Image: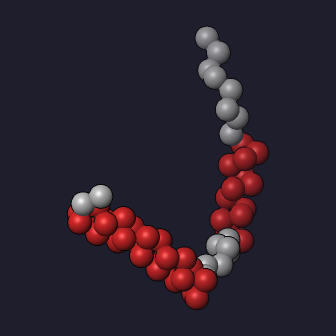
Amino acid sequence: MTLFGYLFWGFVIVAIAFSFFMQKKFGTKAPDKTERQTMNEEITRNSHSNDRPRF
């Protein structure tokens, strides 16, 4: 491999390792839905059908 290849793949490996470290350190929680969002989802789920229009 050329010097460019070593630099490129080295950067890719460092970026993956850094992102893994940051994910473990800070982590992300599951998104919390508000009551309003949950209610709107339920209304949408019950009031809309995915049937094709019939002619």
Q: Nearer the viewer, residue 20 or 31?
A: 20
Image quarter where the N terminus lies is bottom left
Give percent across and percent down for residue 28. Answer: 61, 79
Viewer-proximal residue among 20 and 41 = 20
Residue 2 image position (x, y, % from top left): 24, 60
Where is 1 relative to 10, above or below?
above
Q: Residue at x 39, y 67 (%)?
A: 12
**Residue drawn at the location 67% of the way across and 32% of the way down:** 50
Quarter of the figure with residue 5: bottom left
Left or right: 52 in relation to 2: right
At x 28%, y 69%, the residue is 7
- Position of residue 51 relative to residue 9, above or below, is above
The quarter of the rendered structure image containing the C terminus is top right
Residue 24 placement (x, y as % from top left): 61, 83
| Residue 7 against residue 28 in the figure, above or below | above
Left of 55 or right of it: where is 47?
right
Between 31 and 37, the one nearer to me in the picture: 31
Query: Image height check: is 32 above or below 8?
Result: below
